[in-house]
Amino acid sequence: MASKKAAQGKAQRPEPAEPAAVSLWERLDRPAPAPRAALTPQKIAAAAVRLADTEGIDAVTMRRLATELGVAPMAAYRYVSGKGDLLDLMTDAVYADLKLPDDVTHWRAVMRASALRTREIVLRHPWLIQISSPQALRALTPNRMAVAERALSSLDGLGLDVDAMMAVVGTVNSYVHGAVSAECAQYCLMKEQGWTTPDDVRLALAPQMQYLMGTGRYPTYLRYLHEATRKDDPQWRFETGLDSVLDGIAARLDI
């Protein structure tokens, strides 16, 4: 009887709770059990970024990465658990280039420099735009957090509460993401169609544009087509829009 009760008590004990998920960054911060110079998170990220830059993000698979690194297919899994972790590692690697000089401290200078640098980085690594929509919510990486921290800290002490500070940072980021996404989309379309210059784009779209302008419904756009002198100056267009956003923030918040 006693043994039966003991067995019942044992059966009724709750199952041990599953361990909490450990983030990629916490795992990488832990000291390695043994030095393995052949493969490091930095080497994995660098190889994956090179592959994405040259062949596109779809070419980046764990198997292809192992081939590029000259290791066994399962070797990278010591550091990353799958494609999601790999994308995070790649994102963190390229955002390391966004570090600003220490003497840039005024909020507007920080926001402007960060925006311009982000544009440069994304144009160099356009796959960032492809993964940004689903990945942005999960890609909390050390270097991305450092960028956010630098932006927020530049607003600290200006009389804003933390909600307003985050709204400012988010507004600038939204402008940068939208503007650079549109620019990357145009370059992607040009590459797909074999167009090499803006004139090629205009020539290809000429039939549609001529018909639409001929309807007389878009007189201001027609004026733009005839009078604009900076159609092919995306840098100027980006900076003008950015300065307009920053002017609006400064006026609205009196900072």
Image: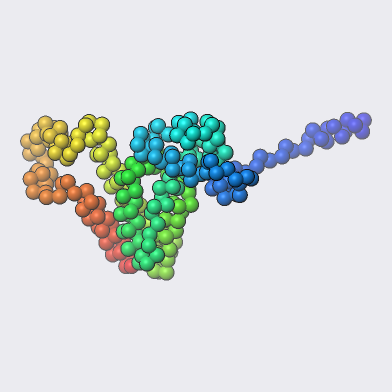
The image shows a total of numbered marks equal to 0
Compared to residue 83, the image places residue 136 above or below, namely below
Asked if residue 167 shows in the view, the reply is no
Residue 157, quarter of the rendered image: bottom left
Q: Quadrant location of residue 151? A: bottom left
Q: Is residue 141 above or below residue 55?
A: below
Where 19 sits versus 112, above or below?
above
Nearer to the camera, 106 or 194: 194
Q: Position of residue 132 (x, y in %)?
A: 39, 42
- Coloring scheme used: rainbow
Residue 200 drawn at (x, y percent): 15, 36
Q: Position of residue 134 (x, y in %)?
A: 42, 39
Q: Quadrant of the C terminus?
A: bottom left
Residue 251 vs residue 132, the one in the foreground: 132
Rendering quarter of residue 23:
top right
The residue lying at 32 percent from left, 67 percent from top is 254
Report the side of 108 relative to 22 (left or right): left
Q: Position of residue 143 (x, y in %)?
A: 45, 52
Q: Is residue 17 in view from this perspective?
A: yes
**Relative vertical location of residue 175 with respect to residue 44 in this rendering, above or below:** below
Q: Residue at x 34, y 48 (%)?
A: 121
Residue at 92% x, 33% y is 2
Task: Tell me the residue at 40%/65% (across/down).
Answer: 102
